[in-house]
Image (cartoon, coloured by chain):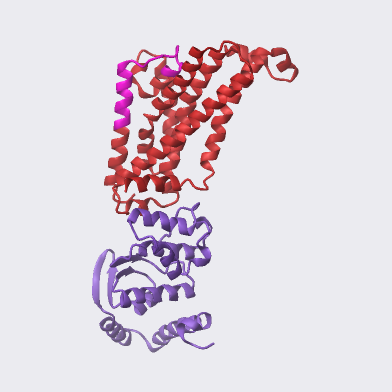
Chain colours: A red, B purple
Amino acid sequence: MIGQVVLTEFWKLKRSAVPWVTLGAMLAAPWGIALFAWIVRDPQRAADLGLLGTKANLAGLEATWPAFGSYLVMIAGAGGLLMLAFVVAYVFGREYADGTAKNLLALPVAREWFAGGKLVVALVWWLVLAVAALAEGLLIGAAMRLPGFTADVGWHVVTGVLMAAAASFLLAPVVAWVTVWTRSYLAALGFALGMLLLGDVVGHTGWAVWFPWSIVPLLTGMVGSAAPVLPWGSSLVLGLTFVIGLAGTGLHLRLADNP
Amino acid sequence: METATAYPNLTVAENLELQRRLTGAPRGSVGEVIGRLGLDPYADRRAGRLSLGNKQRLSLARALLHAPDLLILDEPANGLDPAGIVEVRDLLRTLAGERGVTVFMSSHILAEVAHLADRIGIIDAGRLVEEASRDVLAARARDYVRDTFTEAERQEALLTADLERYFLARTTPERTGASR
């Protein structure tokens, strides 16, 4: 039955424009970095075309593979936190928006399985987005013939993106919990945005390794230098956040009398 | 099913297939309920583009997929046109009479209750104030009307019932057996 639950959750995306919209948004991000890299590399031509070279210089961007790669990792981090929150809020929140939550939870299926099935959908969807953005970014970097590519740099970009994506996903169940609790997309998105901002603030303090929404910025280099490996305490915090979010979502659905 | 809902981007058949898989209903049950509820012309239409009446039919179809012994319906005729109301009425009669399904229904359309129910309960502010067979309740109602209403009020009540019968006869003669 769990297989049927997961299958039917994927079915619900049929003919929905939302997956394509999120894919378009994720694929647009590497082009943005590529544009700045191009401006930095050829400021005169950029100025002739009316683009400001100065802004790219002030951003500290270099038109090299290590710099380009680090920004790809940041896309998977901060952008991922918001995009993944959008995905999770949609997958869970649409049942309330479409009015199908009552029907769903009245079915002879353990309610926690629906939460699990939806998170599987969100995970697959998010991985597709992250891998697509990564692949596109690598192709763009190659097409631009950016200097400084080595096997080591390539490996760090790939593992950095995948680790940022995985770390972001560990925060997803909390967004799911907010969605089912408030029965709304908007509250969940507001929560995610608020946590992203708070994470950035806390990330500049000495407590960054202990606050879940600062750990991803720490890992990706959005605050300070990118940490190649997470401290054990941060891994524990992320794991606990995942478990708490999962338990909260499952329990809320199980105990909801009138979802 | 007071408010009929479905996944708007899935077709009627897909909504039912999704339900079938999660309830373990047999493979052929989707086609069967689509036919029984008159949803054949809409089977491949997205649920988001259905009229309210057809959404109600879809909700009823979902409830019938796994051939239940007990069917609990909340305002099943809500949003249906007269032809649809007659269809649902016939369907529920068939389910109860031929298949032995117990139908527990709530409705504020008293004419439907009168046509369909064997036993009727009257609920007020969450309390069951009276429950009896249809014939017993009808007799009590006649006595009440005779003792309480004026002749003019009784004539008006009869006119309302007559108008309903005439309207149904003019719009669905093949179902009511009346001639135009």
Query: Between residues B38 and A181, which one lies in front from this camera angle?
Result: B38
Q: Quadrant of the N terminus of chain B?
A: bottom left
Residue B146: x and y, percent? 32, 87
Q: Quadrant of the C terminus of chain B?
A: bottom right
Residue B106, compared with residue A245, is above or below; it is: below
Q: Is residue A220 magenta?
A: yes
Residue B32 in which image quadrant? bottom left
Q: Is residue B16 visible?
A: yes
Query: Between residues B47 and A128, which one lies in front from this camera angle?
Result: A128
Residue B40: x and y, percent? 50, 66
Q: Residue at x 39, y 89 (%)?
A: B151
Give the left or right position of residue A55, taking residue B65 as reference. Answer: right
Q: Residue at x 38, y 66 (%)?
A: B75
Give the left or right position of residue A141, taking residue A100 as reference. Answer: right
Number of numbered discs:
0
Q: Residue furthest right?
A: A48
Query: Between residues B165 and B35, which one lies in front from this camera angle?
Result: B35
Residue B125: x and y, percent? 28, 64
Residue A60, compared with residue A3, is above or below; it is: above
Query: Between residues A18 and B115, which one lies in front from this camera angle?
Result: A18
Q: Is residue B155 magenta?
A: no
Q: Is residue A187 visible?
A: no
Residue A156: x and y, percent? 47, 16
Stretch of the chain drawn in magenta: A218-243
Q: Residue at x 36, y 69 (%)?
A: B107
